């Protein structure tokens, strides 16, 4: 999930504002720390938070007008 999200961040590039990207990167850092500590409750919580953020970002991008 972490790898996939980082890949999506790279692909989305300019479509994300700095605040959104920073929030996602913060959750990724917390998730990576939970993984390293093998804290399964924290892993689940951070996975849920990351999924929620990515769904919100995806919806925002989908709803945005295409400016190409």
Image (cartoon, grey):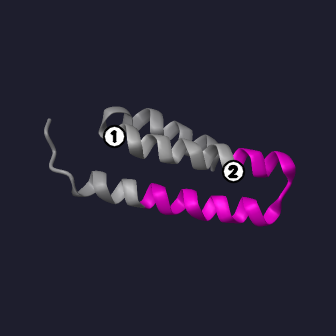
Question: In the figure, 66 relative to 10: above or below?
Answer: below
Residue at x 49%, y 63% (from the top left corner)? 52
Residue at x 32%, y 33% (from the top left corner)? 14
Query: Looking at the rendered structure, which numbered label has been put on residue 31?
Result: 2
Question: In the figure, 40 relative to 36: above or below?
Answer: below
Residue 10's spot in the image, x, y percent?
Answer: 46, 33
Residue located beneath label 1 in the image: 17
For the residues marked 2 and 1, what is the alpha-carbon distance in whole angstroms?
21 Å
Task: Locate the C terminus and report the quarter of the image it occupies.
Answer: top left
Label 2 packing within 10 angstroms: few (<14), some (14-19), many (20+)? many
Mark 2: secondary structure = helix
Q: Magenta residues: mostly which secondary structure?
A: helix
Residue 39's spot in the image, x, y percent?
Answer: 83, 58
- Span shown in magenta: 31-55
Residue at x 57%, y 61% (from the top left corner)? 49
Question: In the figure, 67 relative to 61: above or below?
Answer: above
């Amino acid at each position: 999930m972490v790898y996939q999200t980082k890949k999506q961040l790279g692909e989305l590039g300019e479509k994300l504002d700095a605040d959104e990207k920073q929030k996602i990167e913060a959750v990724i850092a917390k998730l990576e720390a939970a993984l390293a500590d093998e804290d399964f409750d924290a892993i689940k919580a951070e996975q849920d938070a990351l999924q929620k953020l990515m769904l919100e970002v995806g919806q925002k991008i989908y709803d945005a007008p295409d400016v190409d």
